[in-house]
């Protein structure tokens, strides 16, 4: 049978993995897809490097639009990245009637509404399993496997670079910048690693998962985003003493008032499986009414793990491209005319628990004043730890874990505590999730 013909934009880390895995496993993949899948055209800025990867039997061009112009190409795989040229190319490919596979979470989190609407109008598929959690089939699980459920929340380690940095800093005592360089060398980091360390990449992924889980439009601009750059190693150590690990989590929850969508460092009980996800591995917990809690774990970045997800999408499209577009699985799990307009909550409205570290004067009555402010605000304390002051030191650290309260209430209490003359430095606040 005639192969389905694929054009590939960008043969870097993920593109080269996709080419290699498709070649290596072509027989097995064909048995699943029902016909061969062949990358017959590649566009990359570096034609010589691209040719050295794909050989002379594949047409290599520098102008991505030549792939769109080729009527033989059925599916375009976008592995360039970013919101710039990639957006324009994807929209042009859709307009030309091509199906699209992309690993580009930035593009979909920011411009997904426009892209999915264009694809719907044209009757083509946009598949994006690789955009979230690399090789883990979490999009498939949320969109299809859990389709019977009312999903209540999801929480995930969805950025391999930052999880790798946190693991190496904790276990090997390595410096932040050194570990980031390693992550870049291993192909985990984004072209601009700020996206990883400032939580933006995780927020892109959380935005996409939130849309699929709750049937709301992708709304990256409503996400709260905080990365790991301000984390201090002393907080990682104090958290350990209290039985917690600090992870960068992407969280989305359905609440009676609307949907929480947030990315920030988070204390997680050390006994939870997700707290023990190390290195560049990813894991996503999903809590839903019928199935309960499920956990999805695997490699969240890297050449072949991500290629695994890209090729799964190619197989899906190969199987489904002749199906009536109205009978295909909707891009965001819910039918386009059945999307919800549930509001996205501001951070002030989020309810969670907290870890606070206060640098305080080592004097009588300090603890009473701090706990007094929390009591007045009706914030219940879960645990308190006070570091013994070192010899000659006139200050110490006070660590407080609280129970759940609205963030606005915590902000107010922190502002009052900060005013105390015995609180000697800006208070550190890290959110805490029990995930039970
Ligand atoms: P790379 O930077 O390794 O590869 C991108 C490739 O695109 C490069 O070869 C680049 O060429 C090429 N390129 C840039 N502009 C153009 C253009 N206008 N036309 C054709 N080719 C172009 O990126 P990755 O493979 O790491 O990432 C690709 C996508 O996959 C991104 O969206 C990323 O977020 C996503 N992703 C990456 C993962 C990973 O582990 N790396 C995991 C999951 C998703 P040149 O180098 O010459 O500029
Ligand atoms: N930079 C991303 C990460 C790649 O580190 O997780 C996978 O999306």
Image: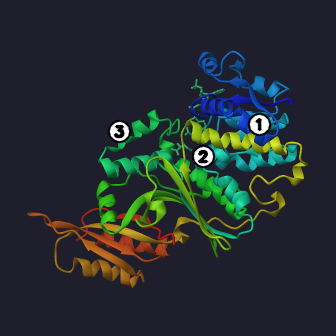
**Residue 398: where, in percent of width, then height?**
26, 70
* Up/down of 171 relative to 379, above or below: above
Dot 2: element: loop
The picture quadrant where one finds residue 383 is bottom left
Q: Residue furthest left?
A: 392
* Up/down of 55 relative to 195, above or below: above
Q: Earlier in the sequence, mark 2 or mark 1?
A: 1
Q: Earlier in the sequence, mark 1 or mark 3?
A: 1
How crowded is the residue under tag 2: few (<14 C-alpha within 10 Å), some, or many (20+)?
many
Q: Which mark is residue 30?
A: 1
Q: Which residue is mark 3?
A: 178
| Marks 2/3: CA–CA distance | 26 Å
- Of the pair 420 and 80, the residue shown nearer to us: 80
Q: Are marks 2 and 3 in contact (CB under 8 Å)?
A: no
| Marks 1/3: CA–CA distance | 43 Å
Q: Nearer the viewer, mark 1 or mark 3?
A: 1
Q: Which mark is residue 135?
A: 2
**Residue 206: where, in percent of width, then height?**
59, 55
């Amino acid at each position: 049978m005639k192969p389905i013909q694929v054009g590939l934009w960008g043969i870097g880390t993920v593109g080269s993995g996709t080419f290699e895995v498709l070649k290596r496993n072509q027989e097995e993949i064909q048995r699943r897809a029902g016909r061969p899948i062949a990358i017959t055209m590649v566009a990359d800025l570096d034609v010589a490097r691209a040719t050295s990867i794909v050989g002379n039997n594949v047409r290599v061009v520098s102008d991505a639009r030549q792939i769109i112009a080729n009527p033989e190409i059925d599916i375009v795989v976008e592995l360039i990245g970013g919101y710039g040229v990639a957006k324009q190319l994807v929209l042009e490919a859709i307009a030309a009637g091509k199906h699209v596979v992309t690993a580009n979470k930035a593009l979909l989190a920011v411009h997904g509404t426009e892209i999915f609407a264009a694809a719907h109008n044209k009757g083509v598929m946009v598949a994006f399993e690789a955009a979230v959690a690399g090789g883990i089939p979490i999009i498939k699980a949320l969109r299809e496997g859990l389709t019977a459920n009312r999903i209540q929340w999801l929480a995930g380690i969805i950025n391999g670079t930052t999880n790798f940095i946190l693991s190496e800093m904790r276990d090997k005592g390595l410096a932040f910048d050194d570990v980031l360089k390693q992550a870049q060398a291993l192909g985990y980091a984004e072209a601009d690693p700020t996206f990883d360390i400032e939580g933006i990449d995780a927020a892109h992924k959380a935005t996409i998962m939130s849309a699929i889980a709750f049937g709301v439009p992708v709304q990256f601009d409503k996400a709260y985003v905080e990365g790991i750059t301000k984390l201090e190693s002393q907080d990682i150590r104090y958290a350990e003493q209290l039985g917690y690990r600090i992870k960068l989590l992407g969280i989305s929850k359905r609440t009676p008032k609307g949907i929480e969508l947030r990315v920030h460092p988070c204390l997680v009980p050390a006994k939870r499986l997700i707290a023990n996800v190390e290195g560049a591995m990813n894991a996503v917990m999903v809590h839903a009414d019928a199935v309960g809690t499920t956990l999805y774990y695997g490699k969240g970045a890297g050449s072949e793990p991500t290629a695994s997800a890209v090729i799964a999408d190619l197989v899906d499209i190969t199987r489904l491209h002749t199906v009536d577009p109205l009978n295909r699985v909707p891009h965001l799990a819910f039918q386009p005319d059945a999307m919800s307009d549930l509001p996205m909550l501001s951070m002030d409205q989020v309810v969670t628990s907290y870890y606070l570290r206060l640098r305080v004067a080592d004097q009588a009555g300090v603890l009473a004043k701090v706990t007094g402010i929390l009591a007045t605000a009706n914030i219940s304390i879960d645990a308190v730890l006070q570091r013994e002051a070192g010899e000659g030191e006139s200050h110490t650290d006070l660590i407080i874990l609280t129970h759940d309260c609205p963030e606005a209430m915590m902000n107010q209490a922190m502002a009052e505590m900060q005013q105390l003359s015995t609180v000697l430095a800006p208070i550190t606040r890290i959110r805490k999730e029990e995930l039970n």
